Amino acid sequence: MQPVVVAYALYLAITVPLTVLVARTLSRHGKTFLEDVFQDKQALAHSVNQLLVVGFYLVSLGFVTLFLTSSETVLDARDVFEMLSVKVGTVALVLGVMHVGNVLVFNGIRRKHLNHATPRPAQMPPPYPGYPAPAPHPAP
């Protein structure tokens, strides 16, 4: 078997399980996070989580497959390892960036939900019940 084919096989054997591991971790912890945010809407939390995970899989596996090919000449085991280090390292960095992106999306969802869930304060009551509020001072 040609060394480049071995490199491709090893690349896929490393990056596909790595992608699945990251996606499962995001799904598990994202689900817990979204269930906390959408306490009254568990179905919505589950749906949002699934949509984010599917998007993560599509982008990640799409990148993994597009990044598979190489124009490098691979003649021996050293070339295989050097090619793999660049390719797997790049995939790991991209997965890390995507993970940070997902965390930012989760945080944005949480912040937006908390802003809508917090009631706006009504007009402040007078400082002492039964007494009128002090009159505002005239502007100089």
Image (cartoon, helix red, strand yellow):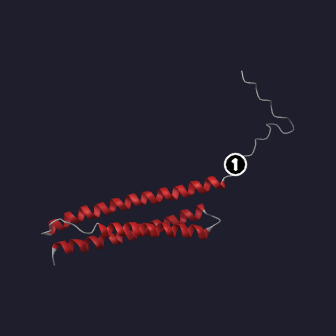
User: Eyeballing the image, is 119 above or below 81?
Assistant: above
Where disc 1 sits, the SS reads loop
Q: Which percent across, then down, holds residue 66?
A: 30, 68
Q: Mark 1 belongs to which amino acid?
A: Arg
Residue at the bottom extreme, as displayed? 1
For image coordinates 46% across by 68% down, the residue present is 53
In the shown orientation, is residue 55 left or right of residue 67? Answer: right
Residue at the top extreme, as displayed? 140
Residue that carries the numbered disc 1 in the rendered image: 120
Q: Quadrant of the C terminus?
A: top right
In the shown orientation, is residue 113 left or right of residue 81? Answer: right
User: Eyeballing the image, is 128 above or below 84?
Assistant: above
For image coordinates 20% across by 74% down, the residue present is 6
- Mark 1 nearby-residue class (10 Å; few <14, some 14–19, many ≥20): few
For image coordinates 76% across by 24% down, the residue present is 138
Q: Which percent across, then down, holds residue 77?
A: 15, 69
User: Eyeballing the image, is 83 above or below 123?
Assistant: below
For image coordinates 52% across by 56% down, the residue present is 107
User: Eyeballing the image, is 118 above or below 131?
Assistant: below
- Kindly indicate the quadrant of the structure image that contains residue 4: bottom left
